[in-house]
Amino acid sequence: MADTDQDQKTEQPTEKKLSEAMDRGQFARSPEISVLFLLAAVLGALGFTAQAASRDIAEYAVGIFTRVGSMQVARDTATAQIGEVMIVGGRALIPFLIGCVGAALLAGGVQSGFRLSPEAIRFKPENLDPVAGFGRVFNKSALVRAGIDALKLVAIGMALYLGARNLMLDPLFSAPVEAAYLGQFLTHATIVFVSRLMFAIGVIAAISYGYEKFKTSREMMMTREEVKDERKNAEGSMQAKAAMRRMARRLMQKQMLSSIATADVVVTNPTHYAVALKYERGKDTAPVVLAKGENRFAQRIKALAAEHGVPMVENKPVARMLFALGQVGQTIPTELYQAVAGILAVVYRTHRYYFHRLKSRRLEQIA
């Protein structure tokens, strides 16, 4: 039955499904890649800090053995000696710890595309189902994983065997050497072993990640019906958003039209643009745009202005600038202060009776 369902999945996954899968933590990942990054961090830390760390440890050891005969072990001195050991050991280990933590984070980020998967860490009661757990343990993927683990064991064993065989030819095992040579040998041996392990794990990681990528891509495939349903849902969502935008635009237009009765002046193009302005001394720092519109909506603004007796002034450049730069509910741009001040000065002189009625009209609207 599962194979039949998989055969019906012939379509590539959509961006929405891929994003949801990433949020659930469903992406190709291989534990061998993390191991490979950790080995690289260890090798890098050895390359950069091995000489300095070995020199510090050697100097500390020489100092300890030099004064071992005169050292007194007591409660107060033991604490200081343990602190010295921790400091010397910490200097040697901290680069490795930092490198390993950084390597683990980098390995996870490389595989996940540096995206967080919040749903992957949530508690899921279905994970406690023993039947489902048995099915996850004994399936085809588990058999493939077991084969990869066996291959990993063989590859690591061969790498370690070849490395040990070459190191056994070192003069350390056949002739007397200086004590300092032992530290060099250990550093060299560690680098050789880690390098061979990196190569072996790198091959296994490539195989493992390739299989996980293939398996995940097959699981992400969709049927034609699923693609159609997702497209319908997306189109429905887009239509809903468009409807909400239209409703918001209508509400804004309704609010603008209701405020025209309290405008000081309407600046027109005269046919293409209309912008209603108000200015209350002591309240507004500059003239405020109450409404603006073009073409048909501009005609509605002008009709309401005429109905309420609002003065209208034809000024093509100012009307265009107010429409382009002005925001409804906000003061006009500073570059238009002088032009609008001139328009208002003319209106205040020629329409005194209107502004006498405008005060009471504004009070009525507040009430």
Image (cartoon, helix red, strand yellow):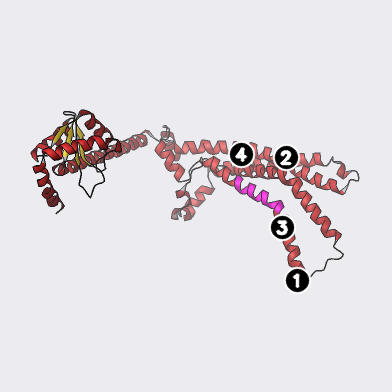
Question: What predominant SS class does the magenta segment belong to?
Answer: helix
Viewer-side label of 3, 2: 3
Q: Residues within 10 Å of mark 2 (few under 14, many from 20)?
A: many
Q: Residues within 10 Å of mark 3 (few under 14, many from 20)?
A: few
Q: Earlier in the sequence, mark 1 or mark 4?
A: 1
Q: Earlier in the sequence, mark 3 or mark 4?
A: 3
Query: In the drawing, does residue 41 fall left or right of residue 249?
Result: right
Q: Earlier in the sequence, mark 3 or mark 1?
A: 1
State how far apart marks 3 and 2 are (Cα): 35 Å
Q: Earlier in the sequence, mark 1 or mark 2?
A: 1
For the residue pair 81 and 291, the one nearer the viewer reads as: 291
Which residue carries the number 3 mark?
87
- Which residues lie in the magenta part? 91-103
Which residue carries the number 4 mark?
205
Residue 208 in sight here: yes
Disc 3 is placed on an element classified as helix
